[in-house]
Image (spheres, rainbow, N blue to C red):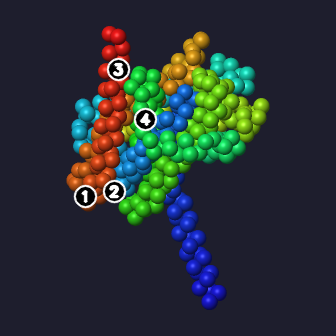
């Protein structure tokens, strides 16, 4: 009997170890999404609009779970990245279009994250003219020497400082009935500022880079169809975890900044939302989290962009190569890091609006990538019997239509304002 118990414990432990070895890409992808752009966008929403966009966050989280499950399924069925699949099905011209969209979105998000590095360390009196070049050089060295994975977990731990928003929400005791009502009561304002902010919410929740990064990460781990149910759990957990952080950032900033009439137009004003938890040291907690999340994204996004574009066109790629062996890969990698870091150094640049604009650009470009994904995952020549079911197609298609409708409404609203 004792032997059977030991065998059972051993088998359960082996199964748990196996599951833990699979789980990771989904959680890391969403954690990287809780970067400077994400936190700044959520804080701005809470400070300016209170709880009124929480219903949108709920819908987008649901859509994110569906979209990322599609990524995971394509990865385990085909063993190929999203760039590869786009090239094979649509050819070089459409691949060039998709990669251009990805590059524009990722360039903007990386720019926002270097702005996050600058803003976070300015809380501690460190000028951006010192912090940004040092971080840019450090990231370039780490990713090009293949040692980035060793420090990835450290930066991830920094980003967990945003868990403090959950504790702050418990301390300040917001009006939970009002919060819950806002989650289930859709409200939308037909003005440019509101629509732009909502598009920014989309851009930071379902960012174009996340789809390429997640699928590539699953392929890199050599996961196959037998691992699908565990990887599906991973992406669902990732979506839920991301939603929890986003939800509490909005709730805390709404209950503190919005209530006091303070707009989240600076990093220090966003840090104020943590004052109920950390008191006068709120800026330390927020600054550390923002720095860790920004550095993590400043490394992941240029790296994943270089991989995706080189993979799409069959160019040599990977940090195990030398710059002379993979010229396009390292040109893209160092080019994105160098140019975005340099742009942040422009004197008198207002960092928070810059960060928010990058998320809004990403939000506008999301439908392009989602359309490619929907067409790919419904191709039986690629997916066999693992194509989308009707429910998945309805949710993913409605997500695309909703974002396009929102962008079109914004465009029309701005045109009409010129004649009013």
Which residue occupies 35% across, 44% down? 82
Q: Name the residue under label 1.
A: 384
Marks 3 and 4 sit apart, C-alpha to C-alpha, by 17 Å
* Place of residue 275 in the rendered image (x, y in percent of width and height, measured from the top left): 72, 34
Q: Mark 4 Cα within 10 Å, few/some/many (few <14, many 20+)?
A: few
Marks 4 and 1 sit apart, C-alpha to C-alpha, by 41 Å
Would you say the residues marked 1 and 2 are in contact, meaning their CB atoms lie under 8 Å apart? yes
Q: Mark 4 points at which residue?
A: 187
Marks 2 and 4 sit apart, C-alpha to C-alpha, by 40 Å
Q: Which element type, helix, strand or loop, lies under badge 4?
A: loop
Q: Earlier in the sequence, mark 3 or mark 1?
A: 1
Which residue occupies 37% across, 61% down? 225
* Place of residue 260 in the rendered image (x, y in percent of width and height, measured from the top left): 65, 27
Is 32 in front, or is 249?
A: 249
Q: Earlier in the sequence, mark 1 or mark 2?
A: 2
Would you say the residues marked 3 and 4 are in contact, meaning their CB atoms lie under 8 Å apart? no
User: Mark 3 or mark 2: which is in front?
Assistant: 3
Would you say the residues marked 3 and 2 are in contact, meaning their CB atoms lie under 8 Å apart? no
User: Mark 3 or mark 4: which is in front?
Assistant: 4
Q: Mark 3 Cα within 10 Å, few/some/many (few <14, many 20+)?
A: some
Marks 3 and 1 sit apart, C-alpha to C-alpha, by 44 Å
Left or right of residue 278: residue 203: left
- The numbered mark at residue 77 is 2
Left or right of residue 239: residue 285: right
């Amino acid at each position: 009997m004792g032997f059977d118990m030991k065998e059972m414990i051993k088998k359960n432990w082996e199964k748990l170890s196996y599951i833990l070895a699979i789980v990771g890409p989904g959680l890391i992808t969403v954690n990287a999404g809780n970067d400077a752009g994400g936190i700044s966008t959520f804080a701005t929403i809470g400070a300016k609009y209170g709880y009124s966009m929480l219903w949108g966050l709920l819908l987008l989280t649901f859509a994110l779970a569906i979209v990322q499950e599609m990524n995971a399924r394509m990865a385990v069925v085909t063993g190929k990245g999203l760039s590869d699949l786009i090239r094979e099905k649509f050819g070089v011209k459409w691949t060039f279009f998709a990669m251009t969209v990805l590059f524009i979105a990722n360039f903007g998000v990386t720019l926002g994250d270097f702005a996050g590095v600058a803003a976070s360390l300015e809380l501690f009196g460190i000028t951006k003219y010192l912090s940004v070049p040092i971080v840019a050089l450090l990231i370039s060295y780490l990713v090009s020497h293949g040692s980035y994975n060793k420090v990835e977990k450290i930066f991830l731990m920094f980003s967990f400082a945003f868990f403090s928003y959950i504790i702050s929400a418990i301390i300040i005791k917001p009006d939970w009935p009002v919060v819950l009502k806002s989650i289930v009561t859709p409200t939308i304002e037909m003005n440019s500022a509101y629509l732009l902010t909502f598009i920014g919410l989309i851009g930071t929740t379902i960012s174009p880079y996340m789809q390429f990064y997640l699928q590539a990460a699953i392929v890199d781990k050599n996961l196959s169809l037998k691992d699908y149910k565990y990887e599906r759990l991973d992406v669902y957990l990732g979506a839920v975890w991301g939603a929890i952080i986003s939800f509490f950032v909005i709730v805390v900033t709404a209950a503190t900044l919005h209530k006091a009439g303070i707009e989240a137009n600076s990093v220090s004003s966003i840090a104020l939302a943590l004052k109920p938890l950390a008191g006068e040291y709120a800026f330390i907690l927020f600054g550390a989290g923002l720095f860790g999340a920004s550095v993590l994204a400043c490394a992941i996004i240029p790296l994943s962009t270089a991989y995706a574009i080189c993979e799409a066109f069959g160019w040599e790629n990977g940090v195990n190569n030398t710059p002379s062996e993979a010229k396009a890969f390292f040109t893209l990698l160092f080019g994105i890091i160098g140019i975005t870091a340099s742009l942040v150094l422009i004197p008198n640049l207002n960092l928070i609006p810059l960060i928010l604009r990058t998320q809004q650009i990403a939000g506008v470009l999301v439908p392009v990538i989602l359309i490619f994904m929907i067409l790919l995952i419904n191709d039986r020549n690629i997916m066999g019997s693992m194509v989308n079911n009707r429910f998945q197609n309805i949710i993913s298609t409605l997500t695309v239509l909703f974002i396009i409708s929102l962008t079109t409404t914004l465009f029309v609203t701005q045109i009409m304002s010129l004649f009013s």
